[in-house]
Image (spheres, coloured by chain):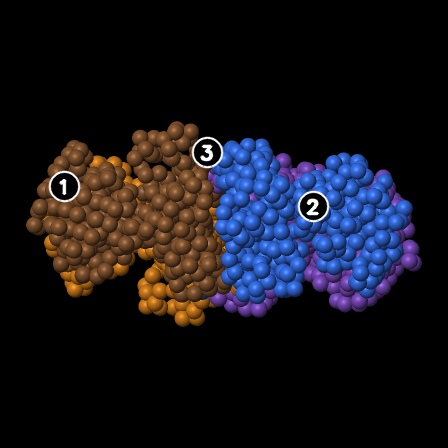
Chain colours: A blue, B purple, C brown, D orange
Amino acid sequence: MSINIGVIGAGRIGKLHAEVLALRTPEANVSAIADINVAAARETAAKLGIPKATDDYREIIADPNIHAVAICSSTDTHSQIIIEAAQAGKHIFCEKPIDLNLAKIDAALSAVEQAGVKLQIGFNRRFDPNFRQMKQVIETGGIGDPNIIRITSRDPGPPPIEYIKVSGGIFKDMAIHDFDMIRFLMASPVVDVFARGSVLVDPAIGAAGDIDTAVTTLRFESGALGIIENSRRAVYGYDQRVEVFGSGGAISVENNTPYRATLSDASGIHAPKPLHFFIERYMDAYIEEMRQFIDAVVNDKPVPVTGADGRAPLVMAEAAWKSVREGRLVRLDEIE
Amino acid sequence: MSINIGVIGAGRIGKLHAEVLALRTPEANVSAIADINVAAARETAAKLGIPKATDDYREIIADPNIHAVAICSSTDTHSQIIIEAAQAGKHIFCEKPIDLNLAKIDAALSAVEQAGVKLQIGFNRRFDPNFRQMKQVIETGGIGDPNIIRITSRDPGPPPIEYIKVSGGIFKDMAIHDFDMIRFLMASPVVDVFARGSVLVDPAIGAAGDIDTAVTTLRFESGALGIIENSRRAVYGYDQRVEVFGSGGAISVENNTPYRATLSDASGIHAPKPLHFFIERYMDAYIEEMRQFIDAVVNDKPVPVTGADGRAPLVMAEAAWKSVREGRLVRLDEIE
Amino acid sequence: MSINIGVIGAGRIGKLHAEVLALRTPEANVSAIADINVAAARETAAKLGIPKATDDYREIIADPNIHAVAICSSTDTHSQIIIEAAQAGKHIFCEKPIDLNLAKIDAALSAVEQAGVKLQIGFNRRFDPNFRQMKQVIETGGIGDPNIIRITSRDPGPPPIEYIKVSGGIFKDMAIHDFDMIRFLMASPVVDVFARGSVLVDPAIGAAGDIDTAVTTLRFESGALGIIENSRRAVYGYDQRVEVFGSGGAISVENNTPYRATLSDASGIHAPKPLHFFIERYMDAYIEEMRQFIDAVVNDKPVPVTGADGRAPLVMAEAAWKSVREGRLVRLDEIE
Amino acid sequence: MSINIGVIGAGRIGKLHAEVLALRTPEANVSAIADINVAAARETAAKLGIPKATDDYREIIADPNIHAVAICSSTDTHSQIIIEAAQAGKHIFCEKPIDLNLAKIDAALSAVEQAGVKLQIGFNRRFDPNFRQMKQVIETGGIGDPNIIRITSRDPGPPPIEYIKVSGGIFKDMAIHDFDMIRFLMASPVVDVFARGSVLVDPAIGAAGDIDTAVTTLRFESGALGIIENSRRAVYGYDQRVEVFGSGGAISVENNTPYRATLSDASGIHAPKPLHFFIERYMDAYIEEMRQFIDAVVNDKPVPVTGADGRAPLVMAEAAWKSVREGRLVRLDEIE
């Protein structure tokens, strides 16, 4: 059995998911793609042999032959499309974040619950082979009880200022993945957050009301401690490392590189930089998350990343922002 | 424009190429698959949506709608199929080695030349991102003049003895890839070979008239020296490393691993073993070699690995075998 | 010219400094060694050929032929001995910390200033070849402007509870080195501290009023951010790493190991654990700090680690402790 | 108890041994140092507080208060001094090689045997912590039965041509250490040698009748195979690596570096070059070999590197040279 799926959004991530669905997930057919920029939708449709391209996502939601949608449009449209798709009985894959506003998230999750459809959130990093191995080692006791988790998460460069302005800020836009990774790897819930931020990459980011460099610490119910380092720019590339230290050892994930060739010359020993950015670094993860979504729909299994998993990091992001603004420790229950 | 291709052979490597052609090379359609074990052909056809499965490769060669064939059958059938396919005007992708016998290779290459079709040999390692980077660094002078090239090539375990018996021996079956890699990376031709062999993995391999451990040295016309280390069994997995040392530096390629997670515990620091075997290690290379073959056919470009490239390593393998048997240095011009 | 030096304290670190002075610093003669446990003093004296062993450090201070003292006694005796030695005109090398109490530190520094003698504090890590290289790269602009500094500092195991009780707590006893390292590597002064602590290693440490796991964050005047991770127990050994991330790159120091032999076997790839503890890890640094102290005395140069350098990390440690107790950000100027 | 030792030769290696004996081996007193360049002897004597400097080594041999000598003069003087020292009843530490001529070696070893004195040869690499760990892993079965040993041995740059001319050639001068390492690590004796050489570093080396690049292969009685790669110049520094591959795994020793600081910047990830040359790379080994020699003399234990250990690599070097000249496999029993 296979399912028909409609892709909503034909930007960078929409194109990526469309290609994964068209070429790499044999049980899914991409029946249609929508984008308010219909030319973009048409281009992707033509390239991948998708039969329908439209500027109106409601044509996809209204199509009785379509079983599921992949929502890849801009964040501010997510919650509304989720509600409409759920009410039409479609299963839903939605890119992160669900929304920047918790009330809107709750409305969307409520619609999903009432409709009884599946909703999977696009926290792709959970499907990265490195982090899956890390989780398995932790779960099977390979490092004993986790004591300290540390995430280093740096982008190769900042997005355009226009994007920054509507992004919800570094915590909701960028650290959101790290908050999710913390929840993915650690069995114990986060109690509180203390975050610090600076503008060290580009003053324009500060002028837009955001920060570009952040250090966030967290406490878990177990007493374990967490650290997240974020920067909008690492000149050597996309820096995505995690280390978990426990009573029985430590496990650490290093960056992936495009090849493993080391050059030794008169100036030193030189290794390649990390894979450039999220598309390159997490391609395997994008494929795997979609395979698992399709598998969940086709075989009626639980999705691996739920709506609640999509909501929780937003709470942490709000707590982090509040902590930066107020210069104090913020408990998560102040937000929720 | 796209082309129709027939796959001949539905064993492990045939299935792999069929899947790459069906799912990963948009400009190719797999029209048919043949195997003397027709059940195997049918299974792959069903899985990949290939319209025709047969036990007779001649049906593929006779099909006027098929433009090219991928020969993945047993080595002893390669030269005959090449000749027939060439005479039928098909472009040909053929797995290595072309044949174990130089005269048969020459007959096949002659048929290809007369027919004016394209022939690409499946030396997949040339398309590995690591070795491509290595070649690029060497060609652009990153290590100056190459002085010593060293290849470490060890399989995780030996094939069945029945396979060993018809394999042509360690040099034609296994080191053939390393002889090709030497030619790929070094601009200067090989002049002579001195090889040593031992039976250290399994006495049954010796009883079958083969060796399982070999050290081969070579001299290039430039005066540079080469080393190949082979073993049929490395308990830690598929060991595929190359180092080229030159007047201006050295470049070395390490093994790829399934993830980059390091575990530190009371017994030490532990990293993952190499990717298990050739399918895992060279999957990207298999895709890339087929993309380039399809591109060569569709756009009438030269193939990246020619029939002559397929012949030369056989000459080196014969020289190595002769060197082991006679305990002496063997010049390549003794063989050719 | 060479100088005569007296060593006060013949415990582990006293013995180490006595040996370095006796065998590795040709311009210094060890004239005497004192310890309230006179047997310990005698044993070291006999082993190293030191002419005098005593249970009374005042004999050393009163000796007009002795030019300098190395204070390696218990922390609670440091400030008093500094004052007496300074008043006697001796140059002083003093182990860290100067004292656990800022008022006592100030009294000692004042005595040193009035006497015009040299005082060097034993922050040995500044002399480690790794961290010296790191500092040089930072100072010469190799990573641009520092944005984030992160120190991972974990002991192989906790000291005895009796020691914990008088240690002044994890920040004054253990993180003190990390606070100094932060000051050594970063040109910008620290403004404030937020620290978190947990008891995850041994409940007895909590019962003694201390913590065994800590995460401290700091802000620098430049806007850069700092992180220190501390644990009293890493089962894989002494974990001493620093990473500084800047606008132009990042530099990171890994652990030293006793050898660089990697074992590959059926269970994985295995590398050696870090050098066991501070004696092994920082032996080169202990030698170099003493050489520089002797050089400063013999050739009347400034010492590389001053009394003010000894005081500042105590202020940071007090701020960190206050932050943990009060669950809030603490500015350094609240302490000073 | 301690012994008096005389150092013969005050060149680079003589100074090094004199310093190790004076400062790092408490049970040895350096009573005298001799060099035909008496100024060099005097300079070292002054620096280290050695009471006597002379231009005549016979004054050392004649001194009844001297128990042992360290022979660090030019190679062509070794055998004669060994004979005289042995006849005078001195224990002997002699730098490698004993001599370039097997007959002279045999005469020297015979004198030592008749005198019943101890003779230790300066194969310092056996005392390197990396190679000692490697040997221990092999001996305790950590890699099963050794199948292939590979040594990469490259100098940062060639010695002066005048030195090359009297050096005995690359095998006796440079690879001699690698031949010894092979014997140190492998339990099975070498049966035969096939070596290849080229002149790729400097034509003047070829004009002097030597080669500067060599690849040597060996067979052990066990059937295991060996490889040695030599080059007189590696622009990235002193390259000293060994890998032993066996039925149960592999162990490999990487280069030591002056520090472990990795720089990541826009051009890549950069690690330090190896420690520059033998003095830096093997300082710990020089100290340890001398400690063991002194221990053997003081406590009448067997020396760790015997005269026979000094002779055997010369046989291998002669076989290698013969193999290069004659282009054929040479059995060691052709030489011995």
Q: What residue type is labelled 1?
A: Tyr
Q: Which amino acid does label 2 sit on?
A: Ala
Cα separation between marks 3 and 1: 40 Å
Residue B133 coordinates in the image, percent (x, y): 60, 61
> Is C278 left or right of B32, judged from the image as shown?
left
According to the picture, the residue beneath numbered tag 3 turns out to be: C200
Q: Mark 3 lies on which chain?
A: C
Q: Mark 2 lies on which chain?
A: A
Q: Do badges 3 and 2 share one subunit?
A: no
Q: Which numbered tag is attached to residue C57? A: 1
Q: Residue sitting at 24 percent across and 50 percent down?
A: C106
Q: Which amino acid does label 3 sit on?
A: Leu
According to the picture, the residue beneath numbered tag 2 turns out to be: A103
Cα separation between marks 3 and 2: 37 Å
Which residue occupies the extreme left position in the image? C64
Residue B293 coordinates in the image, percent (x, y): 76, 60
Q: Give the class, few, some or many, for how many residues have Cα within 10 Å of label 1's Cα (few <14, many ≥20).
A: many
Query: Within the image, what quadrant is residue A12 found in?
Result: bottom right
